[in-house]
């Protein structure tokens, strides 16, 4: 059973936190994580790009000059792609980029991402993260204590004070535990998670 340190906001170790093997000690599946990240990024694409082909742009219709005898290159239309105001070759059209990933693969990818954070010693469990009011310097002080820069902070519930305190810090994102995803877990180097959030993750995935 994996064991990580339990820390306070000042970066001092106050105990140990035992993690569930079924969530934080599984075999890491690189393929599943890759597939889920590709799908997440693809699903964010709008797919609204559009350009006109030579058959859709206005103008043209007749041959600009006769085929032979002018000394110029033969042309069939002034709206061919090589002309100014001509159509686009293989013009992009609106399309759907959405990918479907099996529920089992999404689960394997999530467990692999969580396990990788523990395996790389990049997961920090906090005793609590309660702020009476939004204070950016409090979050900065905590990040400095853990020498964390590119960091994902996960709370058990939506915490407006923590969110407002961290939103102006470059490279730091705050998410409630029910909004975590594989892409964000892999994108950020450090994972700072509260003890209550760990319990919720284990409740869902164990």
Image: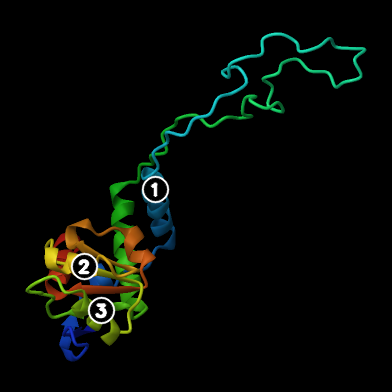
Q: Give the image location of residue 36, x and y in percent.
A: 37, 53
Q: Is residue 79 visible?
A: yes
Q: Which residue is mark 3?
A: 140
Q: Specify whether residue 3 is in view.
A: no
Going by the image, does 42 lie left or right of 7?
Answer: right
Q: Residues within 10 Å of mark 1 (few under 14, many from 20)?
A: some
The residue tagged 1 is 39
Q: Which residue is mark 2?
A: 154
Tell me the crowding category of disc 2: few under 14, some 14 to 19, or many 20 or more residues within 10 angstroms, Cα based.
many
What quarter of the picture does the C terminus occupy?
Answer: bottom left
Looking at the image, which is closer to me, 177 or 72? 72
State the residue at coordinates (62%, 21%): 54
The x and y percentages for residue 73 are 85, 22
> Position of 39 compared to 1: left or right?
right
Secondary structure found at label 1: helix
C-alpha separation, residue under disc 3 versus residue under disc 2: 16 Å
């Amino acid at each position: 059973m994996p064991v990580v340190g339990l820390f306070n906001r000042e970066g001092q170790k106050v105990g140990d936190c035992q993690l569930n093997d079924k969530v934080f000690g599984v075999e890491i599946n690189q393929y599943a994580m890759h597939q889920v990240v590709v799908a997440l990024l693809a699903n964010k694409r709008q797919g609204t790009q559009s350009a006109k082909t030579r058959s859709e742009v206005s103008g043209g219709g007749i041959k600009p000059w006769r085929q032979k005898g002018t000394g110029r290159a033969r042309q069939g239309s002034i709206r061919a792609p090589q002309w100014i105001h001509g159509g686009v070759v293989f013009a992009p059209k609106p399309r759907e980029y959405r990918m479907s990933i099996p529920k089992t693969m999404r689960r394997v990818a999530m467990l692999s991402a969580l396990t990788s954070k523990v395996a790389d010693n990049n997961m920090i469990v906090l005793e609590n993260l309660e702020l009476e009011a939004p204070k950016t310097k409090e979050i900065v002080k905590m990040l400095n204590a853990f020498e964390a820069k590119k960091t994902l902070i996960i709370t058990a519930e939506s915490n407006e004070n923590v969110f407002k305190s961290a939103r102006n810090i470059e490279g730091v994102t705050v998410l409630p535990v029910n909004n975590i995803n594989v892409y964000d877990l892999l994108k950020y180097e450090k994972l700072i998670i509260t003890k209550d959030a760990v319990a919720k993750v284990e409740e869902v995935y164990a």
